[in-house]
Image: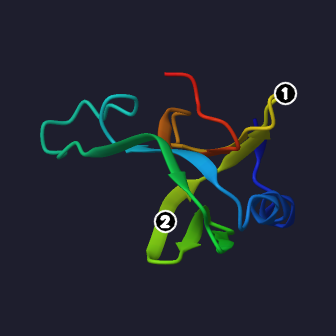
Amino acid sequence: MELINQEIVQQHLDEFTHQPVYLHVETTNGAYASHFDAQVFNAGTFLRNIQVTYIQAKITGGGKEPFRVGLKLDSGWIYVQGLTHYEITENGEFLLAGHNFQGQLAAALEISKTPFPL
């Protein structure tokens, strides 16, 4: 995966606008990013093969902070924060991931025209 280049990622997000796509969304501060600290409340989200059609996409952030991506739907928003890296797979899947300071996965947003393997 490569570090996020905001302009390149925005172009790829725009390529999927106004068409049905499958999403994988994952956030965690627990299972993959264990803090080994009893005072930390572990929480996470996992959604796979959720089909949506977004009408607008926007990547913001950067600098000292990780990036965030918002996908606007007809009836609401999908928002993932903490993204640091991206990749386009051979199958045309667009993968965005956020890695913490130890390199562990903290957030993921993946977009594909076909369902992801289960």
Q: Going by the picture, which residue comes out furthest to the front?
A: 20
Q: Quadrant of residue 5?
A: bottom right
Where is residue 7? Give x, y as percent: 85, 67
Q: Amino acid at mark 2?
A: Tyr
Residue situated in front as seen by the camera: 87 or 64: 87
| Mark 2 surroundings: few (<14), some (14-19) or many (≥20) residues within 10 A | some
Task: Decide: is 9 above or below 3.
Answer: below
54 displayed left or right of 48 = right
Q: Which mark is residue 90?
A: 1
Task: For marks 1 and 2, give the CA distance.
Answer: 25 Å
Mark 1 element type: loop
Residue at the farthest left position = 38
Residue tagged by mark 2?
Answer: 79
Relative image position of residue 18 (x, y in whole percent): 71, 67
At x 40%, y 43%, the residue is 47
- Report which quarter residue 34 is drawn in: top left
